[in-house]
Image (cartoon, helix red, strand yellow):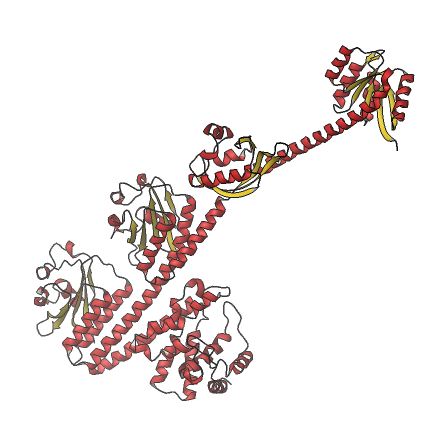
Amino acid sequence: MSKPLRVLMVEDSLEDAMLVERELKRAGYNPDCHRVQTAETLSQALERGPWDIVLADYSLPGFSGTAALELVRLQDPDLPFIIVSASIGEETAVEAMRAGAHDYIMKDRLARLAPAIERELREANVRNERRLAEQALRENEARYRAISELTSDFIYSFSVGPDGKPHYRWITDSFSRLTGYTVEDLRQAGGLEILIHPEDWPAMQKHITTLVSGAADVNEFRIIAQSGEVRWMRNYAQAEFDAGQNRTTGIIGAAQDITERKQREREMEAIVAVAGALRAPSTRASIMDTTLDQLVKLLEVDGGAVVMVDPVGGELVFEAFSGVGADEARGLRLSSGAGITGQVVAGGQPYLNNNFRKDPNIARPDLVPREGVQAAACVPLIARDETIGALWIIRATFISPAEVRLLAAIGDIAASALHRATLYEHTQRRVRHLAALHDIHKVITYSLDLHSTLDFILAEAATQLGVDAVNLLRLNQSIKMLEHVTDIGFRTRGIARSRLRLGEGYAGRAALDRRRVSVPDLNKTGGAFPLHSLLVGEDFVTYFGVPLITKGQVKGVLEVFHRSPFNPDTEWLDFLESLSTQAAIAMDNDELLTDLRRYNDDLTLAYDATIEGWSKALELRDQETEGHTQRAAELTLRLAQAIGIRDDALVQIRRGVLLHDIGKMGVPDSILLKPSPLTDEEWLVMRRHPVYAHEMLAPIAYLRGALDIPYYHHEHWDGNGYPHGLKGQQIPLGARIFAVVDTWDALRNDRPYRKSWPEDRVRDYIRQESGKHFDPEVVNVFLQLVA
C-alpha cells in the first residue's frame, strides 16, 4: 500500500519535478506534490501546510535554495529540508547543511532520494516527539511550581552524581519564605545539615540513602528556620533511575509543612495526659501540684506557679509552686489587679514575653530569679465564665505561641478541676460544719457539765475554723466584767488571767456593741491591745471576737486567734457566729431548758434548709427541672404514709429525697452536663454517684437514717440496678418508694434532652416496669394514689 507524502517542491523545472515525483512513486510513496518558484509562493504554501518534507533546487532564477531554507527554518524549524540539485559543489553543500538543510541529493542520483526522505521523516518525528515532551515537561513544571507557590510547602529536584551525593537542581521560591534560606545558602553551607534539626539528621541521612538506592520514601523531620523557629515537615520523594547508567541520577520530591498538625497532636496528647493525671486528685492542693508537675514534664519549663483569686477580698494569692522562684514567691499576696497577674486575671487574655525580666509591669521584680529565667507566660484560669486565678510558667529558653495555646488548654482543664474540687470541698466543709453543730447540739442537750460542754465547743471551733487558739470569756452580770472560762491552743497560760470591763479592749467592745470585732494584724495596734502583756510569746497576727448572745442577753465573748494573716470568707464567719450561738446556748443551759428545745427545732430547720439548699444547687448543676426535688419529696411522703410509714421515718425519707443526688457532686461537669450519650467509661463514673453519696453522708450520724434513698434508689426489683445489684426485699423500702416517684416526676416534666410524657404514658410505663424496675406492691399503692 502506498504511503501518503505531502511534498513541497522549490523547483523551476517542471520536467525535473516530474522526475522526482516518479521516483517517489517507484519507492512506494503516494506523493501529493506542490511546486513553487518564488519566495512569495513558498511562504504562502508554508502557511497553507502542513507538509511532510521540502525538496528544493539550489539554483533558481531570482531565488535560491539558501533563501528557501531560511524561509522554511523561520516558519517551521522542524520541517525536513533536502536540497535536490543538478550542480552543487561540496563546499556549498556543507554550508547548506550547516545552515539547517538535512541532506542534499544530486539529480542524477535520485535513487538516494527515497531512503533520505524516509530517514528524515523518521528523525523529524523523533524531533517532534521530543519537542512535545519538552513542552509538556515545561508546562508541568510551571504548573507544579505555580501550585507550590500557592502553599507554604515546597517542591524540589536533586541531581545525584556517580558518587551518590545529591546536589540541588532547583527548588520553589516558597522554600525561602518558609525557611529563610536560599539554595545558594545551602550550597555554601555544604548541604542540608544546616537546615535539618540535629536530632533528625541521622534519620534524614538514612532517607537520602534509601532514595539514592532507587526506592521511593516518605519521612517526617524537623527543620530549623533561619529565624530559629522549629517546624515539622513531611517529605514525599522518589528517585529518577537511569537504566542506561544503571543508577539513580536524580531525586524529585515535595515537602509539606505539618507543624500545625504536629502541634495539635501534641496538644491533644498533653490534654489527655493532664486530664488523666487530674482524674485522681480530689483536693485543690493536689490538683495544683499535679498540674505543675505535668507542665514541667510536657513543656519542659524551669518553674511554674498557680495563683488563685481570694473570693473575699479579690487578692491574688500564690498558692502552689514548682522549680525556680518557688521559695521567693511562697506566701506572696498581691492586691487585686496588681502586676502582670492582675492584668491577665482582669483581661482574661494570655501573656507571653520572651524577654520577661525587662517587663516594667512585674509587680515584684525583686522576687524574679536573677538567673535561669528569660521567657514567661501566664494564662487565666476560667471556670464557668469566672476567672478564678492564673497559671504561670517561666523558662530559660524561647516559649512559642503554640506552647501558650497548650498552656491555656491545660489551664482550662486545671480550672475545671479546681472549680469542681472547690465545690466538693465547700460541700464537704458544710457537711462537717453541719455535723459539728449537730454534735455540739447533742453535747449541750445531754451534758450537765457546762465546762466540758464549752471545752467541746472550743475544740470543734479550733478544728473546723482552722485557727490556732480559741478563748472564751463569760460576762459576770453582777460586776459587768468579762472573765476567762476556758481556752485551747495557747502556748502560755497568761490568757487565763484575762479580765475586761464592758467596752474595754476588743472583747469588751464586741460585748458592749453586740457585734463581731476583727483585727487583721495585731502587730499594727501599737501595743494598744489590752491583753498584749498576757499574750507575749504567742505571735498572734489575726483576731476575731464574737459576742455570745442569747435571748437578747450577752453571755460572754468567743475569741479566736491566728498566727498568720487570714482573710476568711462569709461561710467561715457565719460558722463562727453559729459556734458563738452554740456557746451562748450552753452557758445559758441551766436557765433555758425550754429555750434549748426551741433552738433544737431551729437547728433542725436550719439543717433541713441547708439540705434543701444543697438539693436546689444540685438541681441547677445537674440541669434538673426546677422544683423536681420538692415535688418528689412531697409525693414520696404521701406514698410512704399510704404504705404505713410514720413519724421519724418520714423525716428521714424526706431528707433522703432532698439528698438523693448529693453524690453527683463527685461527678465531673464534663460527664454530668454532657449533652450527648455517655461512653461506657463515663457511665462507670456516673454510676458511682450513689457510692459518693454514701461516702459523704455515712460519717454523719445525723444523716445516716436518710442514707437509704441516696445510696439505693437506683437498685431494681429484679436485681439489674446499681451500685450493688440488690434484689426484691433486699432494697430498703424508702428507696423502693422513691424510685417510683422519681421516675413519675422525671418523665412528666421537660428535660434538656427530651420533652415531658403524657400522664397516661407515664402510668403505662410504671405499670410495665412493675416487677422489673419497681416493687409491685409499691406500684399498686402508687397508681391508686395518683388515680
Q: Quadrant location of the N terminus?
A: top right
Instruction: Please give the name of the residue rendered at 37% of the width and 46% of the height, measured from the top-left corner.
Output: 351
Left or right? Give the position of 639 relative to 756.
left
Left or right? Give the position of 120 relative to 428.
right
Count of marks placed on residues: 0
How far across and down, in percent of the image, does residue 694 sit?
Answer: 35, 74
List the single residue furthest toward the bottom: 644
How far across and down, in percent of the image, does residue 562 sit?
Answer: 19, 61
Q: Is residue 136 visible?
A: yes
How far across and down, in percent of the image, does residue 201 sit?
Answer: 45, 39
Q: Is residue 657 visible?
A: no
Q: Quadrant of residue 45?
A: top right
How far across and down, in percent of the image, does residue 424 sit?
Answer: 34, 65
Left or right? Give the position of 591 relative to 296.
left
Please name whichever residue, 267 or 531, is drawn nearer the observer in this view of the structure: 267
Q: Quadrant of residue 598?
A: bottom left
Q: Quadrant of residue 417?
A: bottom left
| Vertical side of 321 occupied by 247: above or below | above
Please name whichever residue, 485 or 23, is drawn nearer the observer in this view of the structure: 23
Instruction: Please give the name of the residue rendered at 77% of the width and 28% of the height, measured from the top-left corner.
Output: 122
Please name whichever residue, 443 or 545, is drawn nearer the observer in this view of the structure: 443
| Vertical side of 39 occupied by 755: above or below | below
Instruction: Please give the name of the residue rendered at 41% of the width and 82% of the height, measured from the top-left corner.
Output: 731
Instruction: Please give the name of the residue rendered at 21% of the width and 57% of the height, measured from the top-left corner.
Output: 565
